[in-house]
Image: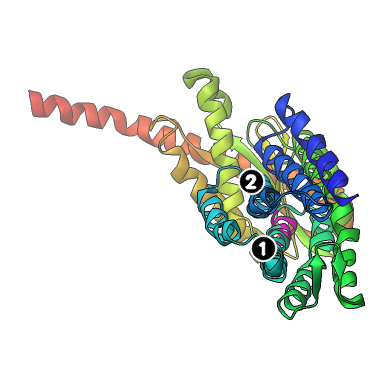
Amino acid sequence: MVALASIVAGIIHVVPWATGRFDNWAAWWGFGHILLGVTAAGAVFRDMGGGDYIVWLGNPLAVVAYAAIFIGLRTFAYPDGSNRLILAAALVAATPLFFSVRIEELGFRVGYLSSLRALFDLAIVLTAIRLARRESLHTAWIVVALFAPTVPLFVARSWSAYHGDIGTSLTGMKHGLGAWLTVLPISFIMFRGVSLLTMDAERGHQALSALLERDPLTDAYNRAGFDRRLARWRGGGAVLMIDLDHFKPLNDRCGHAVGDAALVALVRATSAALPKGGRVFRWGGDEFVCVLPDADQAGADATAAAIAVRYAYAMTGIAPPDLPVALSIGTAVGTLDHIADLIVAADRDMYVVKQRNRTETLVAQRSVSEMHPVIDLISHTQHG
């Protein structure tokens, strides 16, 4: 039954991989389970009178199957990682089994294989825990739940085998403990072959949600992302409304590619300056909203200043030197339960800041214009 379940689970993964619907993780996971099923079936045939070649070939292949299953999960977690060391270690670990085929050495083989199985299952558990925490994959805990119990069970089976509690056949145990240590892992092994499919489905759902909630240009959250997080904001906090000054002249003069680069630079500068828990949303065009939970007025002002400084620095390599680069940032502080009111207040404050920036720019331009004749006069004098 276990052999058939493993083979079927392997085929379920290999076929979509072969048709290009799954990535390489499915090939490792699928072929690993197929190989595991074949070796499990071989053990039964050996007990039914099969030749020693089944033992000589099947046990080393079982180690390779354990490694392939682990590599499948590892490739799912780290697609660009290298697995050569793991494969090499598995081949080295399988080597002693080529020299153990006698029936009297069955206890050694069962104990050795059980120890290796416990190690690979433990590696799978640790990798799944990291996946669950790193990507917020709740289904990764299903993998943990299916693989974690077999770690102590295989350790106990190894101990039992080394202490002579194994009979003269793999399926025949001396007493109840050995039988239970064989049967109990089966209840988990039969179901975990398809556990990686649930993780892939959840990851796909997360990717689709990200596409729906993220602005494709800047990777900031969009209005849909804002609406989804709306219910999470409670208590005090601050809202920033950000607008790019002179964005239209930048677009008209330098082209839309430069304008897009300015938007991306703003989101990166904002993300780097936001405190923990802060989020940036593209509100429309060149306007962005930041939500800062638990922030007071001083914190909002400090964040706004940090964003402006980082953005100005980033724009030195994007905008022409003679084109003014600045941000108008409005702030509002209050309870996030009424965040719509805070956005209106921050928007109003942003327009006040924008008007002040325009006035300062006009004054600066007028000052330069008034100085220009003097500069010309000095220039003529130097050349005259």
For marks 1 and 2, the one nearer the N-term is: 2
Q: Which of the numbered marks, if any, corresponds to residue 52?
A: none
Q: Given the image, on which type of amino acid does mark 2 rest?
A: Thr
Q: Which of 102 and 94 is in front in this view?
A: 102
**Residue 222 rendering spot, x and y as whole percentages:** 76, 37
In the image, residue 21 above or below residue 150: above
> Is residue 348 in view?
no
Based on the displayed image, in which of its 4 quarters is residue 123 positioned? bottom right
Q: Residue furthest left?
A: 384
**Magenta part of the protein: which range?**
128-134
Q: Please give the residue where the numbered disc 2 appears in the rendered image.
A: 75
For label 2, count other residues whose C-alpha is less than 10 Å away and answer few (under 14), some (14-19) or many (20+): many
In the image, residue 69 above or below residue 7: below
Q: Which of the numbered marks, if any, corresponds to residue 102?
A: 1
**Residue 93 rendering spot, x and y as whole percentages:** 57, 60
Identified at 65% across, 37% down, the residue is 24
**Residue 186 rendering spot, x and y as whole percentages:** 87, 59
In the image, residue 297 above or below residue 1: below
User: Which secondary structure, mark 2?
Assistant: helix
State the separation of the CA atoms marked 1 and 2.
37 Å
Q: Given the image, on which type of amino acid does mark 1 rest?
A: Arg
Q: Nearer the viewer, residue 82 or 40?
A: 40
Q: In this view, does 19 lie to the left or right of 310?
A: right
Identified at 68% across, 31% down, the residue is 216
Based on the displayed image, in which of its 4 quarters is residue 295 positioned? bottom right
Nearer mark to the viewer, of 1 and 2 = 1
* Secondary structure predominantly adopted by residues drawn in magenta: helix
User: Which secondary structure, mark 1?
Assistant: loop
Q: In which quarter of the image is the C terminus?
A: top left
> Is residue 181 in view?
yes
**Residue 86 rendering spot, x and y as whole percentages:** 55, 54
